[in-house]
Structures are given as structure tokens and as C-alpha cells.
Amino acid sequence: MYNPYAGISLKNQKDLSFHLSAHHMADVLLNGRLRINLKFNDSIVYAPNNMDISNFQFMHQFADARGDLLNIYRHGYGFTNDQQLCIGARKVIWTEYPVIQNLRHKQDIIEKLHRTSRLIALSDPFLSYTANDLKYLSGYHLMELTNTQADALNSWDIALSNGHRIYLMLTNLEFRGLKLYEQMLHFNHVLAKSDSLDAFVQALDEGTFYSISFPESLKNTLSVLLKSAVVERDTFFVEVEPFAASFRFIGQDGKQLQISDSTIKAAYPIRKEDTYIRTEITFDDGTIMFLNPISRQEEQNQERQKLSEFNSTHTALMRGVYIVLIMILLQLFYRWQIKKLKSK
């Protein structure tokens, strides 16, 4: 079982919040949220704890104490909700399928983003990615969710259940209007090897972080911590502080494998049929901790996820068929017009 928390260091822990002001490019434009800084260097944010990625298709730049830079932007400007967060980007990719995106279109976008960004996160895939999409799509690394409701988490379980080692990153979405229930806020607790932005990206890539969802009223008083998550003799041990109300171990197809109540440390005996195990830990104040999964793999250093490749012969054949059909239709239309003119 690959355990992203094996040998984690508690020296460089960092709470990091991502903020999103709109779900859609149109919302950014229509509500006047677009902020363009013509002096690009003025947009640099130093040593951030909060990363505001408000605009679509515009680069946001962050720097650490050493002056190393990290570029992040949100891709997607069509009428669909197919969007991606690009971390460590070298440039902005403007390719988009603005009206309709099927599986092949979505994979093509991910492939193009994969070439220019270190990490790619699918943004709220439950809004626009089908179960079939999540079964086959590859080349992305993270799943960015703005809520932790069942439909949202189900998208994560679908990807994990089909062999994709994907890690969860929670993002805060700006709420407007009446609140029917207390808003839950999110942050990601990163266990990096150093305090540099490069180490932060590496931690996201390797899954050495966990996500926290908590009621807004706890904003300045929250104090929960993962102390350890280890695999010993085919048993998965998780320890937290303070006292937890429950530990839920979840596996293949999102099935609850075990629940342990009222403890600071829980153990789950790993079974041969377990392909992955992710953990949700709930506290009495309503806070929920989401651990990234431990997952079964054939080799210790197995490549995390391979990028799907298009069948170029099949693609060329299909395009040829489309061209021939269009030519036939044009020919029929032309003959119909000629016949119509002669009849007059």
C-alpha cells in the first residue's frame, strides 16, 4: 500500500487556503470581478497563506521568502463548467471547447495543460464530469472541491475506484445571498519538506497534505492536527488531536469499511480486496478532516498516473468521414438549388 504520509515531517507545516470568487468566466465578467494588473510584477504575493485565484485565464503569481515564483491560473472560459486549476504553470493555455465537451475533448484539454503545468486539478468535477469521464480521464493530479457534500466526494471515489491516485484539495467559494445554513470554510494543511514554494508543490504532488472543513464560527479558534498515519503489519493506524467523535474508513466505490467512535487513534486492518483507503475524521465542533488515500500498487516506485493517448489513426479516420459527409451534403444541396432554378 502506498502511504503518502509515510515518514512525514512535522517541521514545515503550513495552513493554506485557496479562494475562488466565481464558478464561471461569465460570472467574473458580468459581476465586474475581473482584475487586470498591467504591471505584472505588482501582482506577486509574498509568503502567502491564502491564494486567491479569482480570475479565469489570467496568471496569479506567488513568491516565497527566497524569491522563487509560483504561477497559478484557472483554465476554462466556455459555457460548460469544465474547469481546471493549473499549478506551476509556464504559460496560459487558451485552447477550449466552449460549447460541448465530450470525453475526447476533456482529455485533449488535460493533455495540453499537462505539457505546461506541474500540477492540474479538476475543479468541482461533479458539476460537469460524468462517472464515465472520471473513469477514463488521466493526466491530472488533484481534485479541487468547493464543498464536501455526497455528490462532490462521490466524484473523488469514482476516480480512486478506477485506479487513479488523485488527491483532494478543498477550496473556498465566495457565497452570495441568504445563508440557509452555516457556511463551511476549508483549508489544506501541507506537510512540506521545507518552507519553499517548490516543496509546497511537491507535497501536493505526493499527497503529503490533508484537507479541513469547519464551520465559519470556528475561523479563529480551530485547532485540529494529524499526528500520524502509518501502515504497520497490514494495519492502518491514524492518530489525531484533539479527541475525535468518529473515524470513517472509506474504500472501493465509496463504501464505508469501518467506523470508530470517540477516540484519538483508530486502526483499520487492511484486507486483500482493498484497493484504496481514505479517512474522514469528524470532531465534536463540526470540523471534518479528510486524509488522502493509501492505495494499492504493484511497485513501490510505480508511476502515479499515465497520460492517456489519442488513437491518431482513429481520429484521422473519423475526421475524414466527417469531411466526406459534409462534401456529400454540400453536393446534394448544390444539385437541389440547380434543379430548383431550372424548374423556374
Image (tube, grey):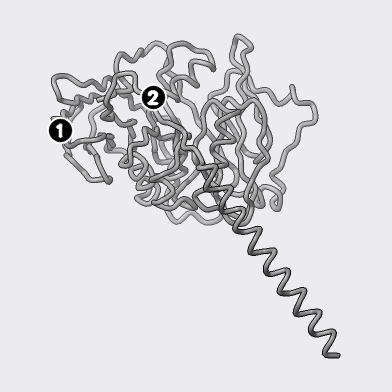
Q: Amino acid at mark 2?
A: Glu
When asked about the image quadrant of residue 47, the answer is top right
On residue 272, which mark appears? Answer: 1
Asked if residue 12 is positioned above or below residue 320 in the image, the reply reads above
Which quarter of the rendered picture does the C terminus lie within?
bottom right
Q: Secondary structure at mark 2?
A: loop
| Residue 172 place in picture, x, y as percent | 50, 40
Which quarter of the rendered picture does the N terminus lie within?
top left
Q: Residue drawn 76% across and 77% down?
A: 335
On residue 339, which mark appears? Answer: none
Q: Disc 2 to disc 1, how far (Cα)?
A: 22 Å
Q: Residue drawn 60% across and 43% down?
A: 21
In the displayed structure image, the side of residue 30 where residue 118 appears, left or right: left
- The residue labelled by disc 2 is 303
Instruction: Give whichever of discs 2 and 1 has the lower sequence position.
Output: 1
| Residue 87 place in picture, x, y as percent | 56, 28
Q: Residue drawn 24% across and 35% down?
A: 275
Q: Amino acid at mark 1?
A: Lys
